[in-house]
Amino acid sequence: MTLAAGYLLLPGAPAPEDYLRLRRESGLSPKTTGQAEAAIAGSWAFRRVETERGEVVAMGRVVGDGGWYFLVADMATLPGHQRRGIGGAVLDALLEEIRTRAEPGAYVTLTADPPGRRLYESRGFLDVAPDRTGMWRMR
């Protein structure tokens, strides 16, 4: 997917302060600096989008075992840059990396917030199963 003029899709994570800002300003739950640093270090793949002036405006990452299980996480685009195909470009780049680096049969999962559901469905993501539910807990 080609980005609109003025944007650059780049491999690698944003700086921790940009990671935290993107999460906060795009409506994701806030995290600490330590959590940001650990997330960046523990990612299997990361993409970010910057403006030509170097402002980080979007990101997404994959957490995985490198074999068969991959989780798309931290998909975030700043509100002033949404509806320009940026999130789709990030997701497509992450899925392409999984396609080229992982063995066939890799399982890719994510948790879709309502605003992102159409994007994920357009890339072939389906509900896990009608008789199953996602679960979570915090330490």
Image (cartoon, rainbow, N blue to C red):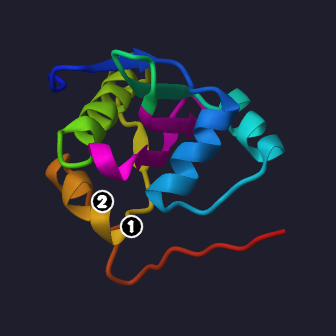
Q: Under tag 2, what secondary structure?
A: helix
Mark 1 lies on a secondary structure that is: loop
**Apparent side of residue 99 relative to residue 29 in the rendered image (left or right):** left
The three-letter amino acid code for the residue at tag 1 is: Asp
Compared across the picture, whether 13 is left or right of 110 comes to: right
Residue 47 in the image: state x and y as whole percent.
44, 26
Residue ID for mark 2 = 116
The image position of residue 71, as x and y in percent, is 50, 46
Q: Residue furthest bottom?
A: 131
Residue 133 position, x and y percent, is 47, 79
Q: Nearer the viewer, residue 32 or 107?
A: 32
Nearest to the observer: residue 27 or residue 103: 27
Q: Quadrant of the N terminus?
A: top left
The correct choice, above or below, for 111 with respect to 16 in the image is: below
The magenta segment is 57-81
Q: Residue at x 48, y 62 (%)?
A: 27
Marks 2/1 in contact by CB < 8 Å: the verdict is yes
Query: Quadrant location of residue 13?
Result: top right
Q: Position of residue 81 (x, y in %)?
A: 29, 43
Q: In the picture shown, does residue 72 fall above or below 1?
A: below
- Label count reads 2
Q: Residue at x 51, y 36 (%)?
A: 62
Q: Label the magenta part by its dominant secondary structure.
A: strand
> In the rendered image, which residue does mark 1 sit on?
113
- The 10 Å Cα crowd at callout 2, few under 14, some 14 to 19, many 20 or more, is some
- Is 35 part of what is drawn in magenta? no
Q: Quadrant of the C terminus?
A: bottom right
- State which quadrant residue 10 falls in: top left
Amino acid tagged 2: Gly
Q: Residue at x 78, y 51 (%)?
A: 32
